[in-house]
Image (spheres, helix red, strand yellow):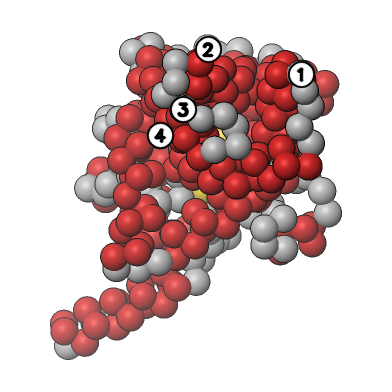
Amino acid sequence: MKAVRLFLRQMTLAAESCALPLVGGQAVMEGVLMRNGASYALAVRRPSGSISVESRRWRTMGPQGLRAIRFLRGFPILVETLSNGVRALNRSADLSMGEDDAEPMSRRQVICTLLMALGAAVALFVAAPHLLALGMEWLGLAGDMTGVSFHLWDGLFKFLMFIGYIAAISFMPDIRRVFQYHGAEHKTIHAFERGGMVTVATARACSRLHPRCGTTFLLFVLSVAIVLHAVTVPLLLMAWNPSSALARHLGIMCFKILLIAPVSALAYEIIRYAATLKDGFWGRLLRAPGLFLQLLTTREPDDEQLEVAVVALREALGPDSPYAGRFESPDPIVME
């Protein structure tokens, strides 16, 4: 009878794993955001040591039907993820300092923050690598923009600046703790997707690396950008090639900015596809670079950080969820 009960239990867990909701998360200041469908839960460790949690509606962008269209859904999903992430990050900073009554970010503040972040990203990952590749051309180590070598140098500098940026900010104590919460988020989602109870102990035993990570998405964005730039920029220069070198390079950099939308859309589909692959050769090959990068963007969390992640996931799923019985976490302070 014990063997029969064990078999039935395994079958139940297998059935649940096939129908599990696709949850995702984000590390914030002293906490974790967990999203489930049209809402998300934000759990934050307060200065007193207790856990505050808020449930909020996920703000979407564009028509709902757009999210079902492959190769078009990636860019609006990226923008709405950044928008909701900025709001959650700002709110978590307030809660982690005990400022419960702080005013939430307005729509205008969110837009201004996103524009400033976009400007910094363009300067760091579009303009700077392009100018450095131009320097390689001047040194005779690369061809002009119509050749592949220019874009290979451009891509190499993109990767080096991206890795260097992550490595540099990891020395900041606050960012290091965010990376620990990032690891706690991944471990908790792994524990949920495996089946069985979701506790600090079961999450602790899981990997801090996850194939659906947003950091992995950024890596795919850089990779897809290199390929598209190497193909589309020479084609553009065949149709538009001004005599002024300044106009030509400024025009190409503007063109690269416009390519952010199709690049992010294609990268989104690749990461979704990679996450569905089994542990075969192609699955491991596509997931390996992102998992390797997560060695930099995640850190092993402590039990208190795992506790916050478990609370966030439990609240994201809701008390009426069929999975509610799989959680053994303390009741958080619920704030409207």
Instruction: In the rendered view, tell whether residue 175 sits above or below residue 288.
Output: above
Neighbourhood count class around disc 3 (C-alpha, 10 Å): few under 14, some 14–19, many 20 upward: some
Q: Earlier in the sequence, mark 1 or mark 2?
A: 2
| Picture layout, residue 325 above or below residue 168 | below
Using the image as rendered, state which of residue 241 and residue 88 is in the foreground.
Answer: 241
> The residue under label 1 is which amino acid type?
Ser
Residue 142: numbered disc: 3
Looking at the rendered structure, the secondary structure element under dot 4 is helix
Q: Position of residue 34 (x, y in %)?
A: 53, 43
Real-space CA distance between mark 4 and mark 3, rounded to the nearest whole angstrom: 39 Å
Q: Earlier in the sequence, mark 3 or mark 1?
A: 3
| Tag 2 near tag 3, CB within 8 Å | no
Amino acid of disc 2: Met
In the image: residue 318, left or right of residue 249: left
- Distance Cα–Cα, label 4 vs label 1: 47 Å
192 to 243, vertically: above or below: below
Q: Which residue is mark 2?
A: 97
| Nearer the observer, 308 or 158 | 158
Cα distance in 3D space between marks 1 and 2 = 53 Å
